Image (spheres, grey):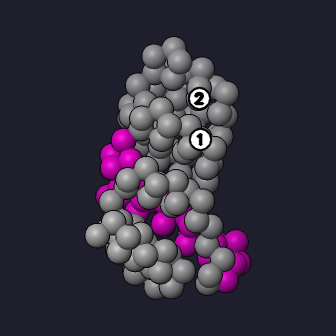
């Protein structure tokens, strides 16, 4: 496997140690592999520790992946859809990854668009509050 594929797989698996090792050895943090990149792979599988490491190491928090306008839009989609699929209730959507991305300066609008599409009051409120705070 190529280094970029190993990096994306480590992010998807939540293997922080391997992710750090690959980055320390020069892996391109934003490299595309398997129709994704490491940040989107970590978001897809809900691996907040990997998202945190990637952000700390300089991952592009606006880099799109196929099907997603931005990592924040992807995180909102995964948060709501995962809650629905696991039988959760509105208001139970996890926000850790969303907050990490917002704290790193991710643009709010793509995530807000997804939250509105799902009619997620919790995430709409979170994202609107962040948007207002930046104004």
**Quadrant in which the C terminus appears:** bottom left
Please, which residue is most extreme toward the right here? 87
Residue indicated by mark 2: 19
Q: Residue at x 70, y 72 (%)?
A: 86
Q: Which mark is residue 17?
A: none
46 or 97: which is nearer to us?
97
Q: Are marks 2 and 1 in contact (CB under 8 Å)?
A: yes
2 or 1: tag closer to the N-terminus:
2
Q: CA separation, marks 2 and 1? A: 8 Å
In this view, 44 is above or below 13? below
The reply to whether residue 83 is in sight is: yes
Q: Secondary structure under badge 1?
A: helix
Q: Residue at x 43, y 75 (%)?
A: 129
Residue indicated by mark 1: 50
Please, which residue is most extreme toward the left here? 135
Look at the image and give the residue range highlighted in magenta: 60-89
Q: Is residue 66 magenta?
A: yes
Q: Quadrant of residue 15?
A: top right
Q: Position of residue 82 (x, y in %)?
A: 61, 67
Q: Position of residue 123 (x, y in %)?
A: 50, 76
In this view, 56 is above or below 67? above
């Amino acid at each position: 496997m190529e280094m970029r594929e190993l990096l994306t797989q480590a992010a998807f698996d939540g293997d922080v140690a391997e992710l750090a090792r690959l980055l320390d050895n020069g892996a391109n943090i934003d490299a595309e592999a398997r129709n994704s990149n490491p940040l989107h792979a970590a978001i897809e599988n809900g691996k907040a520790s990997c998202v945190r490491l990637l952000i700390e190491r300089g991952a592009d928090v606006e880099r799109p992946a196929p099907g997603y306008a931005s990592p924040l839009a992807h995180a909102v989609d995964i948060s709501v859809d995962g809650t629905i699929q696991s039988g959760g209730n509105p208001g139970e959507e996890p926000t850790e990854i969303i907050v990490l991305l917002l704290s790193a300066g991710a643009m709010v609008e793509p995530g807000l668009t997804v939250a509105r599409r799902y009619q997620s009051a919790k995430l709409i409120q979170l994202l609107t509050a962040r948007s207002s705070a930046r104004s």
